[in-house]
Amino acid sequence: MNTTIENIVNQDPEFSESKFKSKVENEFVQIMLSVMTGKIERIRHFVSDSVYQNIAAKVEDDKKNNRIQMYDELNVSNVKISNIQELDNCFQIDVIVHSKALEYYINRATRKYLSGNNKYRTERDNVLVFKKPKDNKVLGNVRKCSSCGANLDINKSGKCPYCGSIFELEKYDWTITKLNIK
């Protein structure tokens, strides 16, 4: 069933459209940077398993082909909510992130240009789908590891520095469940 921001706010008074859009922009940039650096563990806590596996497969394919995907001069010029749905057990928000970047590949060993556009920024509409459970648990100010109870900084990596467990953000907050990435 289609819904509105007001429906979400009625069930989640902490929701703010502007904060949500800021979160979307931040997470999108973090994903693109993780593809470039190959350090995808940094995004594990705010993407679904299937999204994570797709990103991991892309990074692995790039490694196998001795290349690195570059997104130089990355800029998000607009974040637009295209659809909001209230499903049985969660809310879903579809978002279009309009980005601009120099998108090209470099050789992993020599760092020399291989292919793509390193002269002019490519504009792209990226579709991301976020879901949040209706009966989500309240996070509060302090995030604790569900395995060992240690305090966590989920903005850093979502990984417990003591036991290595990944913080399960999908139980608490918006998680990316679909993502188009080249």
Image (tube, grey):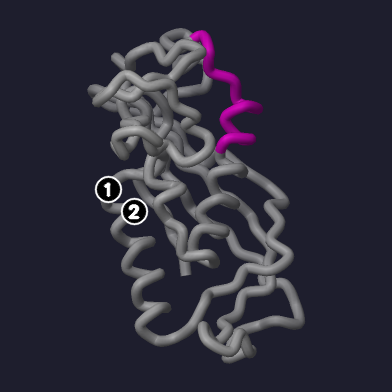
Quadrant where the N terminus is found in the figure = top left
Query: Residue at image x 46%, y 8%?
Result: 10
- Residue 90's spot in the image, x, y percent? 31, 25
Query: Residue at image x 47%, y 15%?
Result: 142
Rendered view: 141 above or below 156: above
Query: Residue at image x 38%, y 20%?
Result: 144
Does the magenta portion include 84? no
Foreground: 57 or 37? 37
Rendered view: 135 above or below 40: above
The quadrant in which residue 135 appears is top left
Callout 2: SS? helix
Q: Which mark is residue 52?
A: 2
- Residue 156's spot in the image, x, y percent? 52, 38
Say which amino acid is labelled 2: Tyr
Q: CA distance from mark 2 to mark 1?
A: 5 Å
Q: Which residues are magenta?
A: 13-23
Main secondary structure type of the part rendered in magenta: helix
Foreground: 108 or 121? 108
Mark 2 Cα shell of 10 Å, populated few (<14), some (14-19), many (≥20) = many
- Residue 108's spot in the image, x, y percent? 51, 83
Left or right: residue 116 compared with residue 40:
right
Where does label 1 land, which residue? 49
Query: Residue at image x 40%, y 78%?
Result: 63
Foreground: 181 or 112? 112
Rendered view: 27 above or below 59: above
Mark 1 Cα shell of 10 Å, populated few (<14), some (14-19), many (≥20) = few
Say which amino acid is labelled 1: Asp
